[in-house]
Amino acid sequence: MFGKAPGAIITDMDGAMRNAVRSVFPNTRHRFYTWHIHKHLIENVAAIRDADSELHKDYNCWFYRREINECEMERRKLVEKYKIGKKNWVAKMWEPRAPWMPAYWRDTLTVGMSSSGRSKIINDFFDGYINQKTHLHEFLDQYDNTLVERCKKESKEDLKSKNSDVVLSSSSLWEAQAGKYYTGKIFKLFQDEMNGRTDLWHKRCSKIGTVTT
């Protein structure tokens, strides 16, 4: 990567992984998969498994807060309401909350990577080519086969994009320009984002001269 560290890395909460990232990429934001946190929570706290339980609703009220100060306020309410002590398992999971709660990551670009999903990229890449019984020499051959197949798929998508017209959903010149340069698959992602812009909420933070944030 020409000496450039990634801006963000998403992994599970493995201690060795945390130490390695801290050592090799000290200036990279390290995020944990929320899926792992919730998995452990569901396994250890019975009330969380019940979507109708009061704890489940209070937990979600805390987790989905958009501002850090609101998160901290809701956390204090949970601690007081359910008498959660420092040695409690739930409290230990909450302690490293900055690397996995959405409110703490609003200022960091993760280019579409989800902290709520499972890490499946490698599994998907080798799906159908290798399994736990594959020997090392077979793995090398299958790795080459996987790359060849991936290149074929990309060439097919490129050909499809060059020889087909995109379907525009509006009269926007912005959308038409994107349709001209993006591949079909990427244009669909762009189009979904563009059409979803009406769902966004806006907050005026400051105004200095003619610049409004």
Image: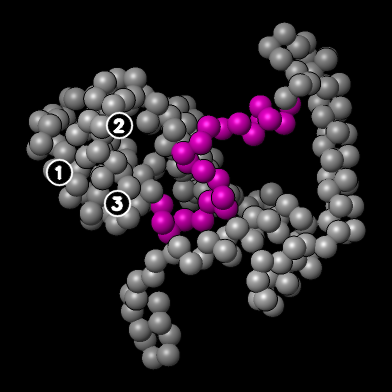
SS for dot 2:
loop
The residue stretch that appears in magenta: 105-126
Neighbour tally class for label 1: few under 14, some 14-19, many 20 plus, Cα within 10 Å:
few
Q: Which tag, 1 or 2, sits closer to the chain's start?
A: 2
Question: Which label number is shown at residue 65?
Answer: 3
Residue carrying label 1: 76
By secondary structure, the bulk of the magenta-drawn segment is best described as loop
Identify the residue shown where x is 26% and y is 45%.
61
Camera-side mark, 2 or 3 = 2
Q: CA distance from mark 1 to mark 3?
A: 13 Å
Q: Does residue 125 belong to the magenta stretch? A: yes
Identify the residue shown where x is 83% and y is 22%.
142
Image quadrant containing the C terminus: bottom left
Residue carrying label 2: 51
Q: CA distance from mark 2 to mark 3?
A: 18 Å
Q: Which tag, 2 or 3, sits closer to the chain's start?
A: 2
Q: Quadrant of residue 208?
A: bottom left
Answer above or below: position of 60 versus 164: above
Identify the residue shown where x is 13% and y is 43%.
77
Camera-side mark, 1 or 3 = 3
Task: Identify the amino acid type marked 3.
Answer: Arg
Task: Please state the horizontal and vertical placement of residue 13, each as a whole percent of the image.
Answer: 42, 30
Q: Residue furthest top?
A: 133
Of residues 198 and 17, which is closer to you in this image?
Answer: 198
Q: Does residue 38 belong to the magenta stretch? A: no
Q: CA distance from mark 1 to mark 2?
A: 22 Å
SS for dot 3:
loop
Of residues 47 and 43, which is closer to you in this image?
Answer: 47
SS for dot 1:
helix
